[in-house]
Image: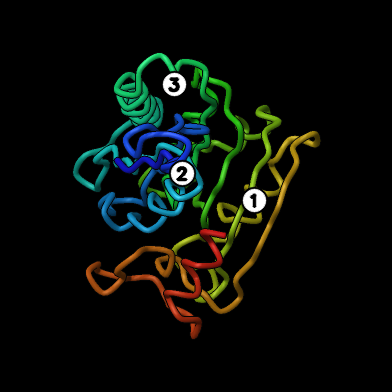
Amino acid sequence: VTSLRPQDSPALAPPSIAPPPLALAAFATGFTIPPEQYSSYVAQLAGLGLCAVAYSDGASTRNAVPLQDGAAGLLERVESEAAALGTSAQKLPLVVLGHSRGAKLAVTAAKLSRRPVAALVLLDPVDATSFEPASVLPTLSTLSLPTAIVGAAAGGGDCAPKGANYASFYDALAPSSPRLLAVLRKAGHLQFVDKRAALLDVCAAGPDRDEAVREIAAS
């Protein structure tokens, strides 16, 4: 967990005193991808003054975790961090982010959250698959939240197939949802992580540099 509390000028306050975070942020990881692979996003969020955490529910091909359970675990982690911040965090809004399958957790968590959700950010989201056929698109259509979606088009949707990819998530947004869609035509599904070489990458990569993909997604 990384948080940032911007320091006041020494002339105004002691260096140890800092304002509380502006919001809480939870990043749901992609399928079987460890949270450390999203450290750059946590740092970026911290730099914006949010208290952020990356979370994996531990789902795998041998360990199916229901979306509701995974989302509940993500929210419990958020509340644990909020409790550590004290009373200043009681009314902070939540920003929910997710990559790949993590987008499904993000949508489910936004639905379940007792905190006000300020925004959704979904990076090359993946909906129903043979491993997890449940769809979150009906849930997404009820949320009416500001939503930013970044899609990757290289590889012809090998890891984010048509009908369950960024376009489907975008089309499912409620009419009243403020929205942003960015499609990276030359980026692949796993080029959003920090160190793709450390993963078994079965998804096609595009010619865009991994660093550039991350920078665009983080912006």
Q: Which residue does the numbered mark 3 point to in the structure image? A: 89
Q: Residue at x 32, y 43 (%)?
A: 2
Quarter of the image for residue 36 reads: bottom left
Q: Is residue 132 left or right of residue 108?
A: left
Q: Could you say where residue 159 lies in the image, as x and y percent from the top left?
A: 44, 63
Q: Position of residue 87 (x, y in %)?
A: 41, 14
Residue found at x 37% / y 23%: 82
Q: Residues within 10 Å of mark 3 (few under 14, many from 20)?
A: some
Q: Compared to 56, does 41 lie above or below?
A: below
Who comes first in sequence, dot 1 or dot 3? 3
Identify the secondary structure beneath mark 1.
helix
Characterize the local packing of mark 2: few (<14), some (14-19) or many (20 or more) Cα atoms within 10 angstroms.
few
Q: Is residue 10 left or right of residue 36?
A: right
Residue 10 is situated, as x and y percent measured from the top left of the image, at 41, 42
- If you read the primary sequence from the N terminus, does the residue marked by circle 2 or circle 1 appear first? 2
Of all residues shown, which one is farthest toward the front? 11
- Say whether marks 1 and 3 touch (CB < 8 Å): no
Q: Quadrant of the N terminus?
A: top left
Looking at the rendered image, the disc whose residue lies closer to the viewer, 1 or 3, is: 3
Q: Is residue 100 left or right of residue 69?
A: right
Foreground residue among 170 and 88 = 88
* Residue 196 position (above or below residue 162): below
Q: Which residue is mark 2?
A: 9
Q: Which residue is mark 1?
A: 168
Res. 193 mark: none
Q: Amino acid at mark 1?
A: Ser
- The count of marks equals 3
Q: Closer to the observer: label 2 or label 1?
A: 2
Question: What amino acid does circle 2 point to?
Answer: Ser
Cα–Cα span, label 1 and label 3: 34 Å
What is the CA distance from the residue labelled 3 to the residue labelled 2? 23 Å
Most extreme residue toward the right, as rendered?
Answer: 175
